[in-house]
Image (cartoon, rainbow, N blue to C red):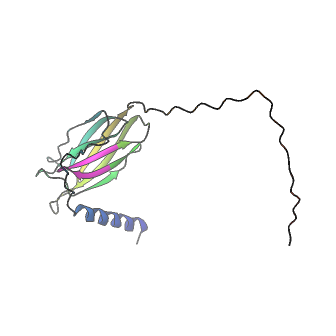
Amino acid sequence: MNKHLIAIVASVAALQGCANQSSAPQVAGEDLNIGLAKTCTPSKVDVSASTSASGTIAMTNDGWCAIRVVEKDGQPFLLGLVRSRPEHGRVLIQKLGGETRLEYTANPRYVGEDRFTVALRSKTQGAPDTMVQVAVNVSMGEAPVEPVAAAAPATSAAPTAAKRTTTSTRTRSR
């Protein structure tokens, strides 16, 4: 069997196993937005009308930003698969707080455009996957605070002693 096909089948099986587990309950007061970019403006994506949709994300490169989608019944999708990866970042698909989040995080210091496509699998058996194409525009976030370099030790103007060269007088025994 083709190595790539085996890897794909194993990945899908692993993801389906994860999808069949119930989502971890949200702890009261838990912040599901930890690490969110300072500026994160996702478009609203309606996936109930057809099997394809598109959306946009405008964000700063200081965290993640996500498009949030739900099935027609208002619940998260069963499974999400990345169909085309972004060139300048990474995508995380997860079920949180009763929705499916398509989270994008840009590579460090990247500024510019990116895009990715995901396939969302419905809980309804036999339903076609919903393809969602996302265009991302990343701008510079707040500049990270660089640590101040320690001052170099002051050098003395006094001349230093010449280095001594030593030779070994030990012999090897055979």
Q: Considering only vertical position in the picture, is 40 above or below 75?
A: above
The residue nearer to you, when weighing 24 against 124, is 24
Asked if the magenta segment contains residue 67, the reply would be: no
Residue positioned 27% across, 38% down in the render = 56
Image quadrant occupied by the N terminus? bottom left
Residue 136's x, y, as percent? 33, 38
Please give the range of residues in magenta. 92-104
Residue positioned 70% across, 30% down in the render = 155
Based on the displayed image, in which of its 4 quarters is residue 104 positioned?
top left
Residue 53's x, y, as percent? 22, 45
Based on the displayed image, in which of its 4 quarters is residue 67 positioned?
top left
Asked if the magenta segment contains residue 101, the reply would be: yes
Horizontal side of residue 110 vs 71, given as left or right: right
Horizontal side of residue 23 vs 5, given as left or right: left
| In the image, farthest residue toward the left | 73
Residue positioned 41% across, 44% down in the render = 87
The residue nearer to you, when weighing 85 against 164, is 164
Residue 74's x, y, as percent? 12, 50
Horizontal side of residue 146 vs 26, given as left or right: right
Residue 174's x, y, as percent? 86, 73
